[in-house]
């Protein structure tokens, strides 16, 4: 890494802004799944396919794309991915076919998350190791802000505008970021340039790296399913919650925002491994309580806020951990971690559709509980063998 280069505040702001934009494009439909289902005249469980397509694109396409184009300089590839995301997003707002929507969501999953992996690697390369956790927390803060502002605002504006108007706003922000990167983002010689692809694959022999990759997959199988369907989940259990749902989504976003920042603080203070165990144990307790108190509206609403807080706390540890265990030497391994997060959500959504149809949406929390228990068991076994 070129030590004379540092991450400037304006550049970090633009990266955070783009994280907000990509998070918004990722879960734009989450807060309005019920309305999208009515608009497209399809079952609400099938509207989740819009998120599944995006997740599968990210999970399957990003590693392949980054391997094929790994000879490109990192920031040049970042700009290419962002440009392709802009073009695909423009196509999306003009299509009227649900099938085309699914295809475009898959493509933006590839390009958008390809950008995201490269952006995280670039930020990490420009950040001193002792500040990595807090800096990544600021980067990921964009995604939590999307929950604070984006999801509730999307639901409120859906009464007056369709989702295409929201996407047009996101496209404008992407173009602004693209222009900034063209003019002010320097090239970054990262550690990955010093090793070949076989050496990158050799990083998979590291037990800590494998654990982070596995944890990302399993954690988001459970988290992604309940997170995506949280709006219809609450409406099914408590129909009267509809009149406060927009405000509740704002509070939920603030909870995610706070969990992310606290996760960065704890990662720098006690290390990502201890913080990950602490967060996972908390997730188990909270999810069990969510299932137990399903008939108590206010208790459930509070528990979901705490669950979201710890969910983003855990997510920060996974992103920090993969950078630490690989020493930021491999965009390919970073992409695998991103892919596992997206594939976890995709698998979780696929399982969620089956659970909703077979047992009812109120049973989703059991999937979330199972994934957290599995991570805690495996981490305990690894700790005993260490």
Image: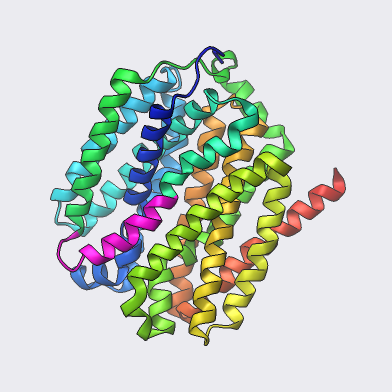
What secondary structure predominates along the stretch shown in magenta? helix
Query: Image point 22% across, 53% down: which residue?
Result: 166
Magenta residue check for 96: no
Quadrant placement of the C terminus: top right
Question: Exactly how many numbered labels are in the figure?
Answer: 0
Query: Can you say whether 330 is above or below 112 in the image?
Result: above
Question: What colour-coding does the image apply?
Answer: rainbow
Query: Can you say whether 125 is above or below 84 in the image?
Result: above
Residue 27 placed where, x, y %? 36, 55
Query: Image point 56% across, 58% down: which residue?
Result: 311
Any part of residue 145 in sight: yes
Is 246 on the left or on the right of 188, as rendered?
Answer: left
Residue 220 placed where, x, y %? 54, 56
Is 184 on the left or on the right of 271, as rendered?
Answer: left
Query: Can you say whether 181 is above or below 140 in the image?
Result: above
Q: Nearer the viewer, residue 354 or 75?
A: 75
Where are the magenta residues, as a range?
144-162
Quadrant placement of the N terminus: top right
Farthest bottom residue?
295
Residue 319 placed where, x, y %? 57, 41
Magenta residue check for 147: yes
Q: Nearer the viewer, residue 267 or 383?
A: 267
Is 94 on the left or on the right of 81, as rendered?
Answer: left
């Amino acid at each position: 890494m070129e030590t004379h280069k540092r991450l400037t505040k304006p550049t970090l702001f633009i990266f955070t802004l783009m994280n907000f934009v990509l998070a918004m494009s990722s879960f734009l439909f989450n807060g309005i799944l019920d309305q999208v289902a009515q608009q497209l005249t399809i079952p609400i469980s099938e509207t989740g396919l819009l998120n599944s397509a995006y997740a599968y694109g990210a999970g399957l396409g990003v590693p392949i794309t980054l391997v094929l184009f790994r000879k490109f300089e990192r920031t040049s590839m970042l700009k290419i991915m962002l440009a392709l995301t802009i073009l695909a997003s423009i196509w999306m707002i003009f299509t009227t076919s649900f099938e085309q929507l699914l295809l475009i969501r898959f493509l933006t999953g590839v390009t958008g998350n390809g950008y995201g992996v490269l952006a995280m690697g670039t930020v990490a390369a420009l950040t001193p190791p002792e500040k990595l956790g807090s800096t990544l927390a600021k980067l990921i803060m964009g995604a939590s802000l999307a929950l604070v502002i984006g999801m509730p605002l999307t639901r409120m504006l859906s009464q007056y505008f369709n989702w295409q108007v929201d996407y047009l706003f996101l496209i404008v922000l992407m173009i602004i970021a693209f222009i900034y990167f063209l003019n002010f983002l320097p090239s970054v010689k990262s550690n990955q340039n010093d090793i070949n692809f076989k050496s990158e694959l050799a990083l998979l022999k590291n037990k800590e790296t494998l654990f982070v990759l596995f944890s990302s997959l399993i954690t988001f199988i459970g988290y992604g399913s309940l997170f995506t369907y949280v709006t219809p989940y609450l409406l099914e259990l408590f129909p009267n919650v509809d009149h406060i749902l927009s405000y509740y989504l704002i509070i939920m976003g603030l909870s995610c925002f706070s969990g992310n920042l606290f996760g960065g603080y704890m990662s720098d203070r006690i290390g990502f491994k201890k913080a990950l165990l602490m967060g996972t144990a908390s997730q188990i307790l909270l999810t069990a309580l969510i299932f137990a108190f399903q008939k108590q509206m206010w208790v459930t609403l509070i528990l979901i806020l705490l669950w979201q807080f710890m969910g983003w706390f855990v997510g920060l540890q996974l992103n920090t951990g993969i950078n630490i265990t690989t020493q930021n030497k491999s965009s390919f391994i970073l992409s695998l971690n991103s892919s596992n997060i997206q594939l976890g959500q995709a698998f979780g959504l696929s399982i969620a559709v089956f659970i909703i149809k077979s047992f009812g949406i109120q049973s989703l929390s059991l999937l979330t509980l199972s994934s957290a228990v599995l991570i805690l068991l495996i981490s305990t076994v690894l700790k005993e063998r260490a």
